Amino acid sequence: MWVDDNNDWLPPGQGSSFGLLDGQYAVYSTTYDEALPYYLSTYLGYHAPDSTVRVAKSFVCPGFEHYNFNAPVTSPTTVRQLYVRTMASYNNLTEPPGEVGFPFGYPDPKAPPHKLNEAQAQRTLSQVWILADADQVAVTNPANTWRAQLPEKPVHGSVRNYVYFDGHVAPSKVKPKGGF
């Protein structure tokens, strides 16, 4: 619906000089405008973004909430659990097969977002993922500032869940030595 209302542009939209962060917060407010819930909050029935930091519960996997002892979902500012399809994640994520571009851009080096049809030009919308589970097995760089907030291992055992542009969710087998 957001894409329909924004002339086929993915968040943050046409004219933006930045894309979404690859490590996504499950929160939104006017200070979290590089996170997907900021743009989708009203479409999901949540309060419109303002100065209050709110958890967008539809972005919190029950498995993540149950098994993540490193950052329990008690403070909205510590809940960063998802990867969104950006340039930074594209360089590290090798599963599932059929990788395609970085439709949401990334704020460093200021890659802007794309239109949905640009993502669809290379693969069908059922082959291009939007979000993926994040954990310390996948996020291997110890210098990553939010790695410690993630579960030590995938919360779904030997698979990670991926959300695709056509709306379906599917698991993909976890690779044994890091990376998605």
Image: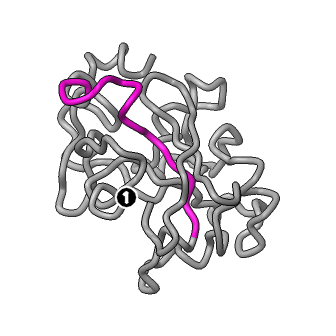
Relative to residue 143, is residue 92 depicted above or below?
Answer: above
Residue type at mark 1 is Leu
Q: Quadrant for the N terminus, please.
A: top left
Q: Residue at x 55, y 38 (%)?
A: 49
Please rate how many residues cluster around mark 1, counting C-alpha atoms within 10 Å: few if below 14, some from 14 to 19, many from 20: some
> From the viewer's perspective, is residue 20 above or below residue 93?
above
- For label 1, the SS is loop
Q: Extreme bottom residue here? A: 142
Magenta-colored segment: predominant secondary structure: loop
| 168, above or below 29, in the image | above
Viewer-closest of 4 and 178 = 178
Report whether 31 appears left or right of 123: right
- Give the image quarter of residue 78: bottom right
Q: Residue at x 24, y 40 (%)?
A: 113
Residue linked to disc 1: 93
Q: Answer with left or right where residue 148 lies relative to residue 16.
A: right
**The magenta stretch spans residue 127:** yes
* Image colouring: one colour
**Front residue (pair 125, 17):** 125
Which of 68 and 170 lies nearest the eye of the viewer?
A: 170
Magenta stretch in the rendered image: 120-135
The residue located at (60%, 50%) in the rendering is 26
Q: Residue at image x 58%, y 43%?
A: 171
